[in-house]
Image (cartoon, helix red, strand yellow):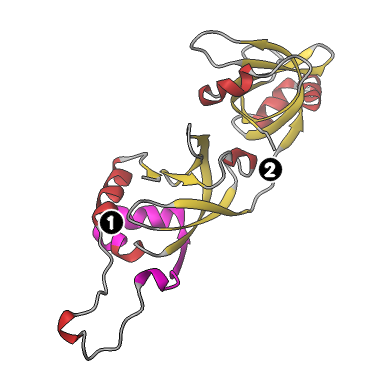
């Protein structure tokens, strides 16, 4: 399945979807007198546009009706990204309105970050649906490790309030790595006047972190958290950006 569950609602959606059969087959009794109908595979899919919340609500209210409405249709969905991540194979995923969608992009955090408004589309089929990222509406927050460290030095309280809980793209030079068994890899980036920026990898990105070495120029996507070391910025759930 390419649409993966976060809640019991999504499990139910999949169960019903996998059991649906396309309607509209020819009546055998009229086969000799009626004009042949175009094969379903040759029909251009109808596009349905709605918000992520509307889609989730449709399945919550009436699963059978929702499956009948969306099956074999191209659906365009707009919503705020709640989370991003990656499968071991073949690609990545995003969460919209509590539903986990597989994306064509293997590293969706290179395109969109949680908190940004996004439009995706995909064909609802019995086997599932893979979403294509069509548009990202909001600006991406990008900051260098040196600039973040400078802001922290100038006013730690204001900087904490500005970035707390926000997802951002951080860029800088690796000055230290820590790899502990069964723990996420920790990368320290050069900051300013001795203040470093700590980036703690997402577990599923440990291999990316383990391949780095001091002196590498890197880019991560992650969220700004409360510092564990006073005055030192901390970025959690970091995903490596390769493009």
Vertical relation: 181 (above or below) 62: above
Neighbor class of circle 2 (other Cα within 10 Å; few <14, some 14-19, many 20+) is: some
Residue, far left? 29
Q: Is residue 127 left or right of residue 107?
A: left
Residue 169 position within the rendered picture, expressed as x and y whole percent measured from the top left: 69, 34
Q: Name the residue under label 1.
A: 61
- Residue wearing tag 2: 140
Q: Is mark 2 on a helix, strand or loop?
A: loop
Q: Residue most toward the bottom?
A: 33
Quarter in which the C terminus is drawn: top right
Q: Position of residue 128 (x, y in %)?
A: 37, 51
Indicate whether residue 109 is drawn in magenta.
Answer: no
- In this picture, residue 138 sits left or right of residue 30: right
Nearest the viewer among 116 and 36 is: 36
Q: What stretch is highlighted in magenta?
A: 40-67
Name the spot of residue 53 as percent of width and height, x first: 43, 53
209 up-or-down from 141: above or below: above
Count of marks, rendered view: 2
Q: Residues within 10 Å of mark 1 (few under 14, many from 20)?
A: few
Task: Confirm whether residue 217 shows in the render.
Answer: yes
The quadrant of the image that shows the N terminus is top left
Question: What residue lies at 31% left-to-right and 60% top-to-bottom?
Answer: 66
Image quarter of residue 161: top right
Above or below, 104 relative to 35: above
Q: Which sits in the foreground, 17 or 119?
A: 17
Q: Earlier in the sequence, mark 1 or mark 2?
A: 1
Q: Can residue 201 be seen in this view?
A: no
| Type of secondary structure dominating the magenta stretch | helix
Q: Is there CB contact under 8 Å for labels 1 and 2?
A: no
Asked which secondary structure carries label 1, the reply is helix
Please name whichever residue, 212 or 143, is drawn nearer the observer in this view of the structure. 212
Which image quadrant is residue 119 in? Answer: bottom right
């Amino acid at each position: 399945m390419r649409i993966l569950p976060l809640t019991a609602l999504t499990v139910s959606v999949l169960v019903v979807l996998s059991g649906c059969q396309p309607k509209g087959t020819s009546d055998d009794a009229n086969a000799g007198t009626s004009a042949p109908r175009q094969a379903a595979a040759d029909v251009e899919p109808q596009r349905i546009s709605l918000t992520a919340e509307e889609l989730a609500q449709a399945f919550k209210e009436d699963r059978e009706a929702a499956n009948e409405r969306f099956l074999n249709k191209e659906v365009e969905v707009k919503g705020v990204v709640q989370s991003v991540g990656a499968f071991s194979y073949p690609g990545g995923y995003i969460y919209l309105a509590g539903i986990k969608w597989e994306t064509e992009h293997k590293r969706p955090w290179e395109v969109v970050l949680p908190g940004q408004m996004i439009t995706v589309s995909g064909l609802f089929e019995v086997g599932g649906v893979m979403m294509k990222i069509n548009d990202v509406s909001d600006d991406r927050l990008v900051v260098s490790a040196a600039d973040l460290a400078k802001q922290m030095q100038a006013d730690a309280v204001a900087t904490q309030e500005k970035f707390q809980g926000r997802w951002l793209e951080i860029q800088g030079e690796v000055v230290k790595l820590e790899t502990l068994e069964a723990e996420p890899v920790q990368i320290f980036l050069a900051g300013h006047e001795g203040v470093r920026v700590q980036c703690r990898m997402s577990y599923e990105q440990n291999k990316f972190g383990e391949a780095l070495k001091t002196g590498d120029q890197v880019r991560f996507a992650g969220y700004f958290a409360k510092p564990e070391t006073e005055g030192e910025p901390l970025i959690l759930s970091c995903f490596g950006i390769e493009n």
